Structures are given as structure tokens and as C-alpha cells.
Image: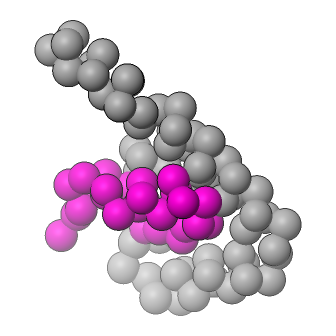
């Protein structure tokens, strides 16, 4: 089943945590905006393990993804932006 919102993903990104996530559901869209997640093939435990190992092995990449995630979430998911989008509707 696909995750419809991915709020927990955004919370991790906002906290500067580098993320490994499947390319499916809300994760495809939410990770593109901050451009801060290591995306892997869904339903593939080996791909998930490879993504985790990649971030563990490359600390500079993990740090960069964490920083981009935090900046991206603040830019695209702020209360001001949410309010503006709600008013548009």
C-alpha cells in the first residue's frame, strides 16, 4: 500500500535526517522538492539495504542530503506556503 501523505518523511527531512525511501506513493513527490533523499526500488529489501549502506558509508553525502532536506522542507512546506495554497483553493 502506498503512503498517501508521507508526513513522517517530511518530519525526518525537516530535522536534517538523511532519508532512504522507496520510489512510490507520496514519497516520489515529497522527495523531489527537497531533493534530499536516497530513493530506492520499492519492495526490494536489498535496494533498501544498499541505500542505507550508501549513506552510512558516505558521511559527506548523508550530511549533504540532511542539509538539503531541512532547507527544502522549510522552503516548500512552510506554514506561509501552506496558507497561500489553501487560499488559492
Say if the magenta span includes residue 64: no
Using the image as rendered, state which of residue 30 and residue 46 is in the foreground: 30
* Vertical comparison of 11 with 80: above or below: below
Q: Residue furthest front?
A: 79
Q: Classify residue 37 by image quadrant.
A: bottom right
Quarter of the figure that contains the N terminus: bottom left
Q: Is residue 57 left or right of residue 29?
A: right
Q: Residue at x 66, y 59 (%)?
A: 66
Q: Which region of the structure is painted magenta?
A: 1-27
* Vertical comparison of 40 with 7: above or below: below
Task: Give percent across and percent down for residue 36.
Answer: 61, 53
Say if the magenta span includes residue 12: yes
Q: Is residue 35 visible?
A: no
Q: Is residue 11 left or right of residue 52?
A: left
Q: Classify residue 47 by image quadrant.
A: bottom right
* Vertical comparison of 79 with 62: above or below: above
Q: Is residue 46 visible?
A: yes
Amino acid at each position: 500500500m502506498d503512503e498517501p501523505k508521507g508526513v513522517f518523511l517530511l518530519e525526518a527531512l525537516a530535522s536534517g535526517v538523511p532519508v532512504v525511501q522507496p520510489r512510490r506513493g507520496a514519497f516520489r513527490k515529497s522527495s523531489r522538492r527537497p531533493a534530499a533523499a536516497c530513493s530506492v526500488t520499492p519492495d526490494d529489501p536489498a535496494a533498501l539495504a544498499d541505500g542505507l549502506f550508501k549513506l552510512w558509508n558516505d558521511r559527506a553525502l548523508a550530511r549533504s542530503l540532511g542539509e538539503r532536506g531541512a532547507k527544502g522542507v522549510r522552503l516548500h512546506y512552510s506554514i506561509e506556503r501552506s496558507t497561500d495554497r489553501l487560499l488559492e483553493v
